[in-house]
Image (spheres, rainbow, N blue to C red):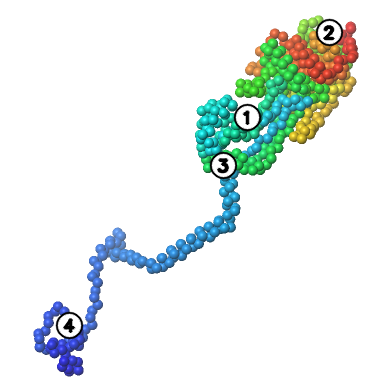
Amino acid sequence: MTPSRDGRSRDPRRPGASSGRSSSRGPVRRGGRQPRPGAAQPPRPARAEAPRRRPADPPPRPRRRPAGSGGTVPPLRRVFRRGDPRRRIHTAGVLMSVVLLLFAGRLVQIQAFDAAEYASEAAELRLTSIDIPTTRGEITDADGNPFAMSVEVRTVFVDPVDVRDDERDRIADELSDRLGLDRDEVLARLAEEPSRYEVVAEDVAPAEWDDIAELGLQGVGALTDYKRVYPEDTGAADLVGFTGADGTGLEGLEGVLDDTLAGRPGRQQIETGVSGTQIPLAGGLAEEPVPGKDVRLTLDQDIQWFAQQSLAERAEELDAVGGSVIVMRPTGEIVAMADYPSYSPADIESSTPEDRANGAVAEAFEPGSTNKVITVAGALEEGVTTPETVYTVPYSLQRYDQTFRDSEPHETERLTLNGIIAQSSNTGTIQVGEQLGAEPLHSYLSDFGFGRPTGLDLPGENAGILTEPEDWWGTQLPSVSFGQGLSVNAVQMAGVYATIANDGVRTEPTLVAGTVDDAGEFTPAPEPEEQRVVGSETAADLRLMLESVTGDDGTAADVDIPGYRVAGKTGTANRVDPETGSYDDGGYTSSFVGFAPADEPELIVQAVLHNPQGAYYGAEAAGPVFTDVMSFALKTLEVPPTGTEAPDLRLFEDQ
């Protein structure tokens, strides 16, 4: 190499070229025109290399300005910049870690700390509680004879899962033969897997189940239950009522006394399978059942039955639409309460509401002449008359626009107050009522128990009608005096004569004597309310007057019980037709009510027949029922015969 002027070596192979890629005159331009070899090149000033340009974007299309703005608007350019991917990954990782930590913490809490609690809750989801049936209390008479009772029965079931395949035919044969079941239905029950509990028979007698249990059939079991039974020979269906399929009292005393009779069922846990089937006896006993209390009534079962039979026979003989018989003690205890029509508790489905209604309290009627004793009692007690006061008694009386008559035509008579009752004179009683006055008469009617509930709290009771005296108009006082223009039920009317027999003291009627618990302890019912209505002297006078009714000159001379003095009163009243609300087609209500022995009363009997055909006067229609029932009751309760003779009363002025 030959050194140049500037001290740099030159390549001998390339004249004028230095060993570097560029000289002081600038870089060699590739692809351009090259100088000739050996030719001197003029010096060029040094020049910086311009930066390379990116291809220019096509010019944007100008946007138009909105109308009226003039010119165009340059286009907008949106520039999106991506975030740092490492930051996104880091954030996602942190969030996932937090979630996993929460899951892990919850898992530790459930499995380590709350394991027992969750296990208990899981068990409770499978277990539930059912009622264990308890014994419903009995309804008995005063001597403990049952009107309604519960008997133990079995509900037979099968567990299809537990039944062996080779035993299915044998089980179907045994159950169908012994329980009177359809074999195909039993086989269908046995095939109900995965069910663990299929009922095949209910109300099975314990002895029948014991015979089946001795066969040792795998998968066949029984539960203890109770069935309500009503002895057929009581004649008290309308009074006692019945229970529903679930054992709840629905009508009669069963409904009224349900809280006392029902007791409290026990509780037992059972397991519920996946299909919802209950598996009996899977859990333990949670609560012992408490049996219901027995209810002891004041009734006598034999007298109740006889009263029902006697009433039904007479009502059917006279084609009456209904009737009732009440047997009561002077102190208000009801010994029998019979009603017609009635029904069989074993065939409730075929009965009607009218059959099941207890007409002894539900049927209100005009008392007729049996009400005259209250008018006379008030007049005696107020001192406006005496038993031997003489009255002029015509066959008919005109009051305002109405004519009142006695039941049979007769000449004008001169009767004592005794005679007015013995002859059952309407016109004579009207005169006594007018002496007493409207307000005092109304007061005595109320005190004797009219116009208010009896206190028995029986369903469907009709308290009757007794209007206030200020509402009495024109003929109301005469009508009420002899028993029309007001209404009562049979228990209310029997209570009037019980008050007279009880020396003038009214005791509220009672039907429940008390309760008996499962230990056999008797708890008496609360004492009934008492009220003196008339004095003892007035009551004694009334008893003699009523005894004269059954004497030779009375309206009920045929009412006779050998060996006993009998007092009573006939009643024949127009009956309101329920469809028309008038007397025109309603017929009559016939009644007889009295007590015996007349000198020392032990029993009161009220007999009522609604719309009897043929015989309708109280003595001839209802009198025979009174005689039969009173005779039977006196003998049943061993009431000794009367040892005295009835005194002769002065009935007529000239007697």
**SS at mark 1 in the image:** helix
Q: What element carries label 2?
A: loop
Q: Quadrant of residue 651?
A: top right
Of 312 and 54, nearer the camera is 312
Q: Nearer the viewer, residue 300 or 283?
A: 283
- Residue 272 got which mark? 3
Which sits earlier in the primary sequence, circle 4 or circle 2? 4
Instruction: Give the label on residue 237, or none.
Output: none
Instruction: Measure how far apart labels 1 and 3 are at the Cα level.
Output: 30 Å
**In this rendering, position of residue 79 left or right of residue 627:** left
As rendered, which of 249 and 34 lies closer to the eye?
A: 249
What's the CA distance linking mark 2 and mark 3? Answer: 80 Å
Foreground tag (4 vs 3): 3
Amino acid type at mark 4: Val
Residue tagged 4? 28
Q: Is residue 515 visible?
A: yes
Residue at x-position 73% and y-position 33%: 293
The residue that disc 2 covers is: 553
Mark 1 or 2, closer to the camera? 1
Q: Mark 1 points at which residue?
A: 211
Disc 2 residue type (three-letter): Asp
Quadrant assignment, res 155: top right
